[in-house]
Amino acid sequence: MNIVGDTKEKLILFGIQTQKQTENQVWASLDELEELVKTAGGEVVCKVFQKVDRINAAHYLGSGKVQEIKDLIEENEATGVVADDELSPMQMRNLEELLETKVMDRTMVILDIFAGRARSKEGKIQVEMAQLRYNLTRLTGKGTELSRLAGGIGTRGPGEQKLETDRRHIRERIGQLKKELKEIEKHRDLIRERREKSGTPVVAIVGYTNAGKSTLLNAISGSDIYAEDKLFATLDPTTRKVTLPAGSDVLVTDTVGFIRKLPHHLVKAFYSTLEEIKYADIILHVIDASSEDIDSHQKIVHETLTDLGANDKPTIAVLNKMDVFEGDSVHVITPVDSQVKVSAKTKENINELLEEIQELLKHSLQKMNLLIPYEDGDILSYIYENGEAFTEEHMAEGTYIEGYIAKDKFYMVKDFSIKD
Ligand SMILES: Nc1nc2c(ncn2[C@@H]2O[C@H](COP(=O)(O)OP(=O)(O)OP(=O)(O)O)[C@@H](O)[C@H]2O)c(=O)[nH]1
Ligand SMILES: [Mg+2]
């Protein structure tokens, strides 16, 4: 990881409170930044924020606060500072000059964690692309941004000509990575197509980071996926087959967690992974019911789903960590079709959740093109009872049926599918 070297960095975190935010919201965000910094391997020595009317375009903070932070750096022997928002290249440069220390922002920390976590080829490419895009916008002038890229801090920035070559290199690398991603996406499309034909419904688990998504997938599939009390434990989507109580199968996919102020470079880079959510039949929105910050978590997940164009999918709110929940009731503040209280850890109520998935799937339809031999008359009756046939022709080999059937019933007739 590049933000923290061999010795643990001692960092000061700072944020701002605009008129739209309450003090509690600012603290929640700073506490989360602390978690992120710890996950990246750093140590937090103190956290401060400033109340402002609007963000200072040149320094992010007002000059009084900058001086206060400078004193804090000396007092605590801090090795750097981290802003709780993405800083503009100018803000970063100016702050570095004024504070005479390493200045980082929330985006850099998240990118750093992602870089250390990506396992699959696709994940690695996506992270590198996000980092390059972030760095590209920071290659704007003299100053220290470029030396940050090169790794050594304190050396002066290069001249314009060198900058131009560096920019070109980055663009070329982005172009190359895009091509590689396209290939992987093609493969993914193929798999998706095959999956759609097979009619196996897809369930996507989404939620705020650390809500318990991976633990839930383990609980319902009996598998052993990496879950940890750390932010962004999961980067690469994992899919498992799960059999519902009535006997039909679904594919359940675990996804990367969402977080407030998720850098748009990352959303963009991870779009192909997150796209899986768009093709899901049902969304399980896992909510950590024991979190104090439950409302804003739900809101952020809903906003991110809206950005992805997946906010109108059939959704079940999975209120998780009920084993440690101490309140009276949990408020679900985003639109959902139903809600189930569970504990992924103790597996309490997991069966109810599976029943609920089954229930929702009844409303999602699968197209069928079938040829049913005359001796399988019972299958035909099954279709009349459970589906809708809009074309029915009697051929030499059997009855040809075209129509729709509920996804959770399709498995009964799937063996009679023919190509359209
Ligand atoms: N007490 C309790 N802890 C839980 C429960 N479910 C998950 N956890 C814990 O919460 C932490 C995060 O769980 P994960 O399953 O890794 O969460 P995630 O949503 O996949 O997190 P990311 O992949 O980092 O976004 C772990 O320490 C789990 O053991 C639960 O029902 N009860
Ligand atoms: Mg996870």
Image: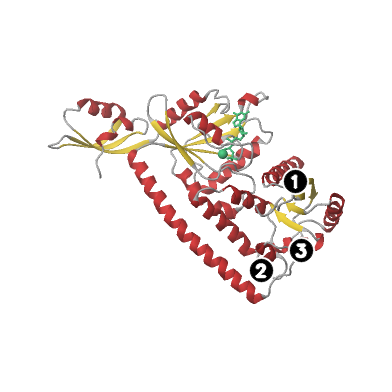
Earlier-in-chain disc, 1 versus 3: 1
Q: Secondary structure at mark 2?
A: loop
Compute the Cα span from label 1 to label 3.
Answer: 24 Å
> In this image, 50 relative to 382: left or right?
right
Give the residue type at disc 2: Thr
> In this image, 151 relative to 213: left or right?
right
- The crowd level at tag 3 (other Cα within 10 Å; few <14, some 14-19, many 20+) is some
Q: Nearest the camera: 279 or 151? A: 151
The mark closer to the camera, 1 or 3, is 1
Tell me what residue is drawn at x 51 percent, y 32 percent: 218
Earlier-in-chain disc, 2 versus 3: 3
Earlier-in-chain disc, 2 versus 1: 1
Give the residue type at disc 1: Glu
Q: Residue 204: percent from the left, percent from the top?
A: 48, 38
Classify the position of ligand 1 by quadrant: top left, top right, bottom left or bottom right: top right
The residue pinned by badge 1 equals 43
Q: Nearest the camera: 327 or 324? A: 324
Q: Residue 265: percent from the left, percent from the top?
A: 58, 55
Q: Secondary structure at mark 1?
A: strand
Marking on residue 94: 3
Compute the Cα span from label 2 to label 3.
Answer: 13 Å
* Residue 315 position (above or below residue 185): above
Residue 340, quarter of picture: top right
The residue pinned by badge 2 equals 140
Marks 1 and 3 close (CB-CB < 8 Å): no
Q: Nearest the camera: 201 or 78? A: 78
> In this image, 23 relative to 136: left or right?
right
Tell me what residue is drawn at x 48 percent, y 60 percent: 178
- The crowd level at tag 1 (other Cα within 10 Å; few <14, some 14-19, many 20+) is some
In the displayed image of the protein, which residue is found farthest to the front? 6
Give the residue type at disc 3: Asn
